[in-house]
Amino acid sequence: MRLPFVIMMLLASPVAAQRFDSNAPIDVDAGRIDIADDSNEAIFSGAVVIRQGSMILNADRVRISYAKDSAGNPQVQRLDALGNVRLRQDTMRATSNSGVYDVNGKLVTLIGNVKLDRGTDHLEGARVVWNLASRTTSFDARSASNPGGRVTGRFTVPQKKN
């Protein structure tokens, strides 16, 4: 009876134990940056590392889309990560082919060959979406190429003390 509760808690909120400040500044470190100010985007490449609060995103390439405020200052709207995407937040580790961080919507989506580890628990699927505002998670295995896909997982069971 305990295992379904553990699974439900992990699937419903792998980031529930962690507090994440989605209003924290976004720091970027990369080998190169190309800015297209007319189209309001910056493309970072070369072992990109992005940090916001306790969340760290690594990728080969990240495109940051922004809008300009009334003073002409850029305000980050969205990050699109591509290639060797890795996301870490406290005890959670995830990898995927690509990822999107909708800053205003407070949604992080990892897409393609998603693998997620939290402690000794492990999940795999095609896509995971974290809602940073509600601190909920949705894991999906369906994709255009695999409409009947399944999520797989392995969860540790607490050992009874004798």
Image: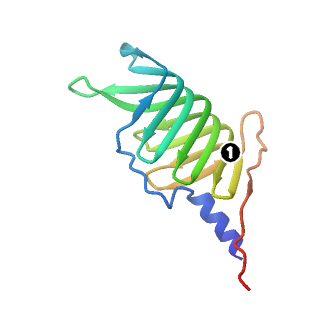
Side (left or right) of 6 relative to 152: left
- Circle 1 is placed at which residue position? 115
Percent x, y of residue 112: 68, 36
Q: Amino acid at mark 1?
A: Lys
Instruction: Please identify the quadrant where the N terminus is shown.
Output: bottom right
Percent x, y of residue 42: 43, 21
119 shown above or below 75: below
Percent x, y of residue 5: 65, 70
Depth order, front residue of 121/66: 121
Side (left or right) of 90 relative to 20: right
Percent x, y of residue 101: 49, 37
Q: Quadrant of residue 36?
A: top left
> Number of numbered discs present?
1
Residue found at the far bottom of this picture: 162
Q: Residue at x 65, y 68 (%)?
A: 6
Side (left or right) of 154 relative to 119: right
Q: Residue at x 67, y 64 (%)?
A: 7
Depth order, front residue of 55/70: 55
33 shown above or below 77: above
Q: Residue at x 46, y 55 (%)?
A: 134
Label 1 element class: strand
